Image (cartoon, helix red, strand yellow):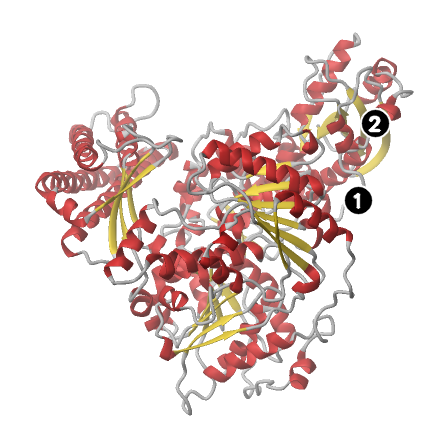
Amino acid sequence: MDKDTVYAVVDIETTGTSVTDGDRIIQIGCVFVQHNRIINHFETDVNPLREIPASISRLTGITNKRVRHAPLFDDVAATLYSQLTNTVFVAHNVNFDLPFINAEFARVGYPELTIEGLDTVSLSQILLPTAASFRLRDLSSLFNIEHDNPHSADSDASATAELFIFLFRRLRALPLVTLQQMIDLHPELPLQTAALFDVAMRLNHEKPRKLPDYLYIKNGLALRHASALPATTLAEPVKYPKTKKQKQKLMPDNLEWRPEQAKMMNYIYNNYANSDQHPVKQMIVEAPTGIGKSLGYLLPMAYLNQQGPTVVISTATTLLQEQLLDQTLPLLNQIVPFQINAVLVKGSRHYLDLQKFAATLKVAETSKQTQLLKLRLLVWLTMTTTGDLDELHLATYRAPYFQEVVHEGTIREDNPFYEDDFLRRRDQQMTQAQVIIVNHAYLSEHASDLGERLDRPYLVIDEAQHLAENTLRQRRTQIKFAQLTNALHHIQRDINREIGPSLLALFTGDTQATNTLHRLVLLSEELEETLNQLVNQLFLAFLARQRGNNQNQTIEKLIPTEELDALRPQTDPLVATIVGDTTDLLAQLGGLRQSFDRQQDRFSASERHLFEQVDTRIHQFDDEVSQLQDIFAQVTKTHTASLFWVTINHVGDRNSLQFASGLLATEGFLCRQIYAHFQPVLLTGATLFSSGRSQYILDQFDLDRDETVTHRMRSSFDYSEQAQLFIADTGPELSRVAPADYVVYLTAAISQIAGAVNKQTLILFNSLSVIEQVYQQLVEQPEFAQREIFAQGISGSRERIAKRFATSHGAILLGAASFWEGIDLPAEQLELLIVTRLPFDSPDRVFVKADYARLEAAGKNPFYNAALPAATLKLRQGVGRLIRTPTDRGAIVILDQRLIERHYGQSILRALPADLPRTTGDVTAISQGLVNFFEKKPAKPVTPPEV
């Protein structure tokens, strides 16, 4: 490859994926690129002399009728072979297209093409490290590449050619130091893809480029300068716009007027303003979807901040943090007549440690996944100003490599990247920002630090329904004994492996260091034995008599504190031995470290990396042992809000045993550990209340009714015109029906209901095992042969399923747990919602069982004080998936007759929108009702609220 190379960018459509199974090409598209310009095209349909499967015709639009008179591959082979000879073959997944074409050439008597090949998928992953998806359709949309007919070879080839030109320019724009590091990694990429790096390097040496002003080189890494926050004006404070007229004057023309949003703004401002004239109360505001909740609290907080403290906003996930920063804050700055700066803050392990990353670049890497990650990080460092790894949208944060490069939260002044450290950048920006955006997990861990550093700031908790759950999860300590044993095995292997680098080989000739290493191996073997004894004690005491369940699923067992206390004569000596041996392990490591530091200059980069890896593993092992010690220490000082439990994968599998402790309830904790460090808290969310004066939510938020003001904003949606609720009044008795019979009922009901109307359908379950069984039966139903069916736990990650579902038509998605909320599917992306059963928590779950016992001990009824309000809220959240905008229209079906047969059903129904029309009937009546609903046009146009 050189500057004059002609690149043949190819895409093919086929009857399937295997030539050996008789699959054939049905369309070829080829675009020729030279000097970063398209110079020629070639495209043709091909008669495969076999039937094109219906699924392929649906995907590509290529039918049997269309190719009937098209040329055979034999007829186009000569032209195609001639055009591809002496080119470099480029494809979006080159390992499919080139071998398939070569197999077709071989079939008709031509020799295989022996040309070089490049893969634009790999190049996109490396050069566009922050892209959320690398599908050709998504990349075309991202860069405004014309791609009118996805899965049509000519359109795909043209789009891939434009993408390749863009990627090659991007590659050449990289700093020389970055390009050289990419080449030095010697990555194994598809075919000759990595050779393109050398081509770019040669071209850049021939025509050198100046390093852009926004980049600088530090210790061999090309980094982007930190972006300064915009200067904030220090003029007189601007008066808050209390009236409708004042607010409308500020709003951009494209922003609709929302009366409930305006009320919410005033409620918040009035509560916190003039605090010297009235007591400020804790505040709960339920703000339904569609009223503009984020702006509803941010605007009054921005005005309050002018003369008041900083504003800390906590939300449920890192994705929601990013939405606030990237979408809501820019809108706020368009509205208010002063500058508001915000900084996004996450836990330290979300950030890259530059020193650790630089060290890994010097280590030869055989893992293709790790090679690809290093390449992506090198390019990303020329783009990022935050070092936040979430920018990469990776699904592989659990990859071992990330444990080597994530930030641990501290940095020494002698670190070569001290001035460039991403955590230091973040902390510096915090001192200049008016708004700090965190997530609930971070808030739970760092409330005291935030309160002290920012001098009791305002605290807004968005998506507040997740606060208790996230706080409890954050306060849990879980010990995986298999992980501890595995760490010891890694330490032993790195010290004395026979083939490959080892610490014993590093210190050959150093008697003292060698003796220390042998002592480390002995200690690790003794620790392994003691850990096994502790596992056996816990297993025999709490799990040996445990019976298996039908699905052979994970087993959780609650351990009463008194039983764990009674076991202490057996466990305390073992824990003491483990702690003592771990202390000795660290002491021996300390002596070895001194010897290593004295001789460091004689070691290669990979040898230094090996030592640091062992050092890290031993310190991580020590951290885990400290947590184990903490769990047992809690037994003597525990109170009713703590609990202990053990988990195994299935009966008898003691090697999988996990031991854990955690906070059971947030009662008292949120007030003391979080709220106390801030101004009176504001909690908000779209779905917070299970009833009019719900004590449940006050308990969850650890608030006193007399010290809390609550507001429930009205929805801006017209449910009487936009939606209909259908409730099944027949069905199996859920407490008695056999699991297999229930699956048969659900499959039949879903087939009839979803089959009656070809609409985008979300079906919510309480169990992944039921989803799997229903899915297996649904895909066999002939009426769904033409419809895509996605299932959680089967069709990929939640994000992947949601994305594919949102771009489908008439698809069916079977989801549980996380699909009950947090998924936004407006308009025709979702028109039918089916709830298979009321979402009561399983009483067999450890936390549920313990919480119910706690309530009973306090003289409260667990069903009415926990189970019913929790299920009501979850159902409200599930129903909330359907109507997302004022123009949406859709139907809800609930296949659980308890909603109308049981007394508590009325309580649940009262929590749903009052103007939501309701109909009851059997599955046949519901199916006909759905047909009627979707055939009927709205009686009046659905319009947004008053403008």
The residue under the point 38% across, 31% down is 550
Badge number at residue 146: 1
Relative to 236, is 582 on the left or the right? left
The residue under the point 81% across, 17% down is 48
In the image, farthest residue toward the top: 109
Which part of the image, by quadrant, shows the C terminus? bottom right
Check the image and report above or below for 344 versus 151.
Answer: below
Q: Amino acid at mark 2?
A: Thr
At mark 2, the secondary structure is loop
The residue under the point 67% across, 34% down is 120
| Pair 2/1: label in front | 2
Which part of the image, by quadrant, shows the N terminus? top right
Percent across and percent down for residue 719 are 65, 63
- Check disc 2 and report the residue beneath it: 63
Percent across and percent down for residue 728 are 58, 48
Name the N-terminal-most of marks 2 and 1: 2
Depth check: give the residue in front, 11 or 734. Answer: 734
At mark 1, the secondary structure is loop
Q: Amino acid at mark 1?
A: Glu
